[in-house]
Amino acid sequence: CETTTSISASASATATSTVSLKVQLQPCQPCNRLSFDRTPGVDATPRASIFEHVDGCRFCSTLYAHFTLPNGKLGHLFDQGSKTVEQAAASPVQPPGRPVSVTRLLQVSFPYCAALERISIPRMTKNIVVFKPVPPLPPAPSHHTLPVLDPALLSKEMFGNILVDPPRVAVVPEDVVKVVDEVVREAINLGPPWKLETSVFAPRKQESDARDFLDNDQVIARMFQKDWVRVARQDRFFAYIKRENKKAADRAGITDLDPPEQVFKDLEALLVSRYRVIAAAFTYYASLGSGSLGGMQLNEYTEFLENCRIPEPDSKAIKRSDCDTLFITADFVEDRASDEAQFMEGNALLRFEFLEVIIRIAAAKFSEKPKPEAAEAAAHYGNYGIVGYMARLLDENVVPNLPPVAAELSDRFRTTRLYTPAVDACFAPHIPLLKMLYKRYLVRADTGRRPKLMTIEHYLKIISDCHMINSEFTAREAKLCYLRAKMVTVDEISDRVANESLTFIEFLETIARVSEYNWYPTDAELREMRYKSRLEFVKVVEAAPATGTGGGVTVLRGPSGAPHPT
């Protein structure tokens, strides 16, 4: 750096005089740090002294630096008590780049200033290294913006001395509950074990055709025999089976035909083993129509065909129109004076007629198949004729394609849901009231007479008066509950009234089945399914379709059709 000051200079023969002196320090080498009094108006003794060089003196060449004074003489500069320090060169500061970020925009150092660089360059000597002076700090703030220990003090030491806020401790009393598990053993009289024979369902064993609480295999076999006799004793059906059997033998190249009696025996053995499914399908599709409960109408018959994928548009014998012709053929009564003719309905199949029509469908569908396919099927089923056709129809079309609700057996609900101690305990206190309700709705509105058993009209009147019909539980489901609650009736024609009516025990089962459809969860189940209230669950179920979504909640059906939101 370069500075000008007044220094006391000593000469050998002259008095002390004031000399204006400029001192220049070179960087990057040992030098003397000078200290001058900068207080204006004060006559202080300078710390830097100068004395004249004596010509011919050599030892001073290694001790002091030689400076040329303004009068042309050599002199030595001496600083009293200072230490030798190292000067470092300061290169010119490059101007900052254009700020492109918050950090550069809010810079923490002073920007480069060209004016400071110009005034710092010495003008008396060339090739001088540039040193930039450091600008002074800004003045301290005039007041505190943050809480400090002493807001009245504004010295720089007080800035940053933030007041420490002591932590606040709040004591909140809480009740401490200590849970203690204690095992208490008490003798409980559970009474005799629960038995179905002593429950509210006990009368069913005496009043049902099965003489049991379930539709056992014996009653199914008796029901099939009654229907099979009505089918097989028809002359036209006997001739039809004989004709179809001969046609199948000719296609297979068999000359030794089985007698018709053997064909009927084999067909009977096959059908009796599958008759539960056939009867369950008939009951389901009969409930869909608008006619009597004991008959399947043409529209429901067509729905059965479509569900089981039976019609073939390109076939010569099993198109939709061919299936309608088979419906008419099976619905025809040869003897108008027979018992069957008295209960026949137009365009509706009874249970034995449904058995006949599916036999005719099997023959029409598979008798015209190519010979290789027919031979392979005959080898698989062990029969080349009508028995093989029937087994193939049941295995390939009916059983795999029936809707689950159509193939459901009535005994499944009874064994898993109805015959339980909980249901028995629920019904028992209300049996007198339910008997009064059962008898009250038996009265016919037109004649005032009271039949012994409840019909479908009486049952639907109860459902309507209790406001049970809604978007989820329609009249179709109500009729299906009615039919599924009935025990098997062996003779659907002679016992027509019993076949289409409800006993009191069957009425109890319909209540259980209806409640299963109109299923409501417990409070714990509501919380598990994330419903806020029971009303919210009811609104969601009523607004949702049978298998769609409502309010973001999927409505599914349980084992017997009950909606189970998940």
Image (spheres, rainbow, N blue to C red):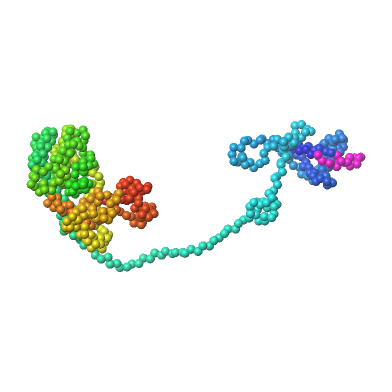
**Residue 160, image x, y percentages:** 65, 51
475 up-or-down from 100: above or below: below
Observer-nearest of 316 and 43: 316
**Residue at 87% in and 41% down:** 18
Q: From this viewpoint, which residue is outermost toward the bottom?
A: 187
540 up-or-down from 385: above or below: below
Q: Is residue 190 visible?
A: yes
**Residue 459, image x, y percentages:** 22, 54
Q: Which residues are magenta?
A: 4-19
**Residue 309, image x, y percentages:** 23, 39
Classify residue 349 as left or right of residue 13: left
Classify residue 420 as left or right of residue 9: left
Is 63 within the magenta?
no
Q: From this viewpoint, which residue is outermost toward the front?
A: 446
**Residue at 7% in and 47% down:** 337
**Residue 88, image x, y percentages:** 71, 38
Residue 378, quarter of picture: top left
Residue 430, quarter of picture: bottom left
Indicate the quadrant containing the N terminus: top left, top right, bottom left or bottom right: top right
Q: From this viewpoint, which residue is outermost toward the top?
A: 126
Observer-nearest of 29 and 166: 166
**Residue at 33% in and 50% down:** 541
Observer-nearest of 90 and 154: 154
| Dominant secondary structure, magenta | strand
Residue 82, quarter of picture: top right
